[in-house]
Amino acid sequence: MALPSSLLAEPEPFDDLPPEDHSAPPAVTLRPVPTLVEAARHASPTTLAVERMLPVLPALAGLVPDGLRRGSSLGVSGPGARSLAMALMAGATSAGSWAAVVGDPDLGLVAAGEVGVALERLALVSPPEPSAWGDVVGTLVGSLDLVVVAPHHRVGAETVRRLMARVRERGSVLIRIGDGPWPDRFDLTLTVVDGSWEGHGSGHGRLRLRRAEVVATGRRAAARERRVVMMLPSPDGSPTAPELLGGG
């Protein structure tokens, strides 16, 4: 989608970059998803809040004990990565932060609402053209607290380098969903390594919950590997409190 001109009021961060390469689910009350103009108007400034953390749901405390550190990047991959990314958004948006999801048309708003995402503070952006991807994401991380991306092309190293400089400057958080290559190391990597659905019978029944094992690795304080087993989702759609598997 084309970005409104109001979001591009400040100088473009990447204007020097070349093109690069059989039961009904629980009822959920959905509010209208805001436009990018509304998101930019209501989002609180992030430039003076680099030292703060974005909160996460209690169920994710074993993976992200202190919350999401502003100015950082996360990689979320494996089966169930989208559900985990939505759970990460839930705590922050429920606490008042604004978020955007770029290039993930399969994200379901009903599922996001069940996880706990505040839909009135969530903007959905269609996949930009590869040549415009860096500009679009750079504008969003300069305006919102949390930006989730699911690129459908190989993102270049220079684009990511400039993008992360923008993230650190503005104190936002960038989450990348997917298993494909990424030209930089994430500050925190969350990988769903195992999962099994429960509730189905021999060819019948409704899938009620998924038991998933998630591995967290990262840089600096997050360098020590942590493994957590959790329900992603539980029967009501939200993640449950995790069970630590050693390592504390």
Image (spheres, rainbow, N blue to C red):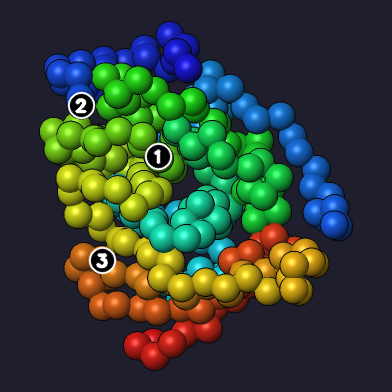
Which of the two residues, 152 or 230, is positioned nearer the viewer here? 152
Query: Which residue was labeled with disc 2?
Result: 21
Query: Which residue was labeled with disc 1?
Result: 149
> What's under tag 3, amino acid-wise?
Gly
Left or right, 160 with respect to 56, comes to left
Which element carries disc 2, helix, strand or loop? loop
Could you tell me how far apart the alpha carbons at marks 3 and 2 are, in whole angstroms?
28 Å
Q: Earlier in the sequence, mark 3 or mark 1?
A: 1
Q: Which residue is drawn at 53% across and 83% down?
A: 243
Residue 206, quarter of the rendered image: bottom right
> What's under tag 2, amino acid-wise?
Asp
Which class describes the residues within 10 Å of circle 1: few (<14), some (14-19), or many (20+)? many
Residue 78: x, y in percent? 41, 60
Residue 242: x, y in percent? 54, 78
Residue 100: x, y in percent? 49, 36
Query: Which residue was labeled with disc 3?
Result: 218
Q: Is residue 41 visible?
A: no
Number of the front mark, 3 or 1: 1
